[in-house]
């Protein structure tokens, strides 16, 4: 891959900022980037990346958001794979006209399996917390990650070995019996699960660790993150976090293993959002329409707030720096206000200081401080995307002015923007992403 630069897409907020729409555009003919595969590098079936393109809408969960453009997906070893949900998603994509969706998929055999046992345990645990819920999608992600830390957990490769898989599932069920038994949740018989996973193994391509190198040999890779950096398991505001490394550390490590280079694009909105419990310092009843987001039984309410460059600067820093900014939802009227500081008991705060990586005591203190902080707001002058780019000292490389792929606007320089459709199959050297990624990404933080 001489001269090829890969791209990493991360959400700088709490999720739902438009990563899917961004990845879809990067993979489309309009971008002309020659993308060979979308690589998922964290999360699992709880992802919900909405893409509207060519008269179709799909909420991508495990398939990469380049699927409408015919770009294959690689589920890396860092993804938690849920085969039942994957089968359902494949059927949905086929109904939307995607030929042989499973044929576009390759899964690293080292990836952990999220099973119905994990899902039942996740929901039982959140139910038991009552009003003190941490916030969860109820999809078993946390239980999958936690169990794998202490036990010999089932993997995708185990689906090829029914006897070994059955033993792991038996131990998993025994471990969770005390939690799930008294709850309102259950799961299929182990024999039925083993049979289902055997069928799954026959329907998908399960690969070894060389899958990335083989994909990279065909062209550029786009690494698609799930959730948001402010929910990161080590950098988010504990305990209202995910069990997943959201910042691009793992993506960078995989790219370094290829001997290749990458540029990181950070995605945000013109206002802040988050699902469920946890700090949102600029929260306000803005009432902007959210056709693809709603209150969930386990996630909690969908919340909105004024734009917050303080949180976004923190996210950029814990990412180890990024190379370009993507600003979405510019079709929404906009708050026209943003936080320039927080009023706290200790005085005015204008920056959030990251602690050491994996220092959860520090993250809990940040949670407490942010929960008590009150925003100091100032008006946004002029174009919100340009205003934010100046505050974050980053080039704005792509903006979204509606839900559809055709609503992406690609920026060649600070003073000129051209509709993505105008590029067609033009010279990619003139494209905004190449321009924005002409410098290497900063070193990994922490």
Image (spheres, rainbow, N blue to C red):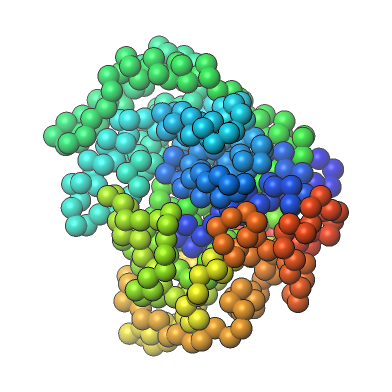
Q: Residue at x 72, y 63 (%)?
A: 419
Q: Residue furthest front?
A: 55
Q: Measured from the top left, where is residue 396 in percent x and y?
A: 67, 68
- Is any atom of residue 115 visible in this view? yes
Which residue is more in the foreground, 132 or 274? 274
Left or right, 313 with reference to 235: right
Left or right, 319 with reference to 350: right
Q: Residue at x 55, y 49 (%)?
A: 51
Which of the image's four quarters has the C terminus? bottom right
Q: Residue furthest left?
A: 182
Which of the image's four quarters has the N terminus? top right
Determine whether 260 is above or below 134 in the image.
above
- Is any atom of residue 443 visible in this view? no
Q: Measured from the top left, where is residue 170 in percent x and y?
A: 30, 20
Numbered marks: total:
0
Q: Measured from the top left, where is residue 63 in percent x and y?
A: 54, 38
Which residue is more in the foreground, 15 or 270? 270
Determine whether 208 is above or below 62 in the image.
above
Q: Measured from the top left, where is residue 436 in percent x and y?
A: 74, 63
Q: Image quarter for residue 327? A: bottom right
């Amino acid at each position: 891959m001489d001269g090829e630069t890969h791209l990493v897409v991360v959400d700088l907020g709490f999720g739902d900022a438009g990563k899917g729409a961004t990845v879809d555009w990067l993979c489309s003919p309009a971008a002309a980037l020659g993308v060979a595969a979308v690589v998922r590098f964290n999360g699992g079936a709880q992802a919900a990346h909405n893409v509207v393109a060519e008269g179709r809408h799909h909420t991508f969960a495990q398939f990469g958001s380049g699927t409408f453009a015919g770009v294959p997906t690689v589920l890396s070893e860092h993804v938690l794979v849920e085969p039942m949900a994957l089968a359902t998603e494949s059927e949905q994509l086929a109904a939307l006209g995607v030929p042989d969706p499973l044929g576009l998929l390759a899964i690293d055999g080292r990836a952990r399996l999220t099973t119905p046992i994990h899902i039942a345990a996740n929901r039982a645990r959140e139910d038991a917390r009552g009003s003190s819920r941490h916030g969860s999608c109820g999809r078993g992600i946390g239980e999958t990650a936690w169990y794998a830390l202490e036990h010999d957990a089932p993997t995708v490769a185990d689906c090829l070995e029914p006897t070994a898989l059955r033993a792991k599932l038996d131990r998993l069920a025994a471990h969770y019996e005390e939690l799930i038994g008294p709850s309102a949740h259950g799961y299929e018989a182990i024999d039925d699960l083993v049979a289902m996973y055997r069928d799954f193994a026959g329907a998908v391509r399960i690969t070894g660790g060389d899958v990335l190198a083989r994909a990279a040999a065909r062209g550029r890779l786009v690494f698609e993150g799930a959730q948001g950096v402010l929910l990161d398991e080590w950098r988010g505001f504990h305990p209202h976090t995910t069990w997943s490394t959201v910042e691009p550390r793992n993506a960078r490590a995989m790219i370094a293993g290829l001997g290749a280079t990458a540029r990181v694009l950070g995605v945000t909105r013109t206002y802040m959002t988050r699902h469920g419990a946890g700090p949102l310092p600029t929260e306000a009843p803005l009432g902007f329409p959210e056709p693809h987001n709603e209150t969930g039984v386990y996630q909690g309410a969908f919340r909105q707030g004024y734009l917050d460059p303080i949180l976004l600067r923190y996210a950029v820093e814990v990412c180890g720096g990024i190379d370009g900014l993507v600003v979405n939802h510019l079709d929404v009227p906009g708050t026209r206000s943003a936080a320039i500081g927080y009023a706290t008991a200790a005085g005015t705060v204008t920056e959030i200081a990251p602690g050491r990586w994996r220092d959860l005591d520090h993250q809990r203190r940040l949670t407490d401080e942010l929960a008590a902080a009150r925003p100091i707001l100032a008006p946004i002058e002029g174009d919100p995307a340009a205003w934010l780019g100046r505050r974050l000292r980053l080039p704005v490389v792509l903006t979204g002015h509606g839900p559809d792929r055709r609503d992406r606007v690609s920026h060649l320089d600070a003073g000129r923007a051209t509709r993505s459709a105008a590029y067609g199959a033009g010279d990619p050297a003139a494209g905004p992403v190449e321009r924005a990624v002409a410098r290497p990404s900063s070193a990994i933080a922490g």
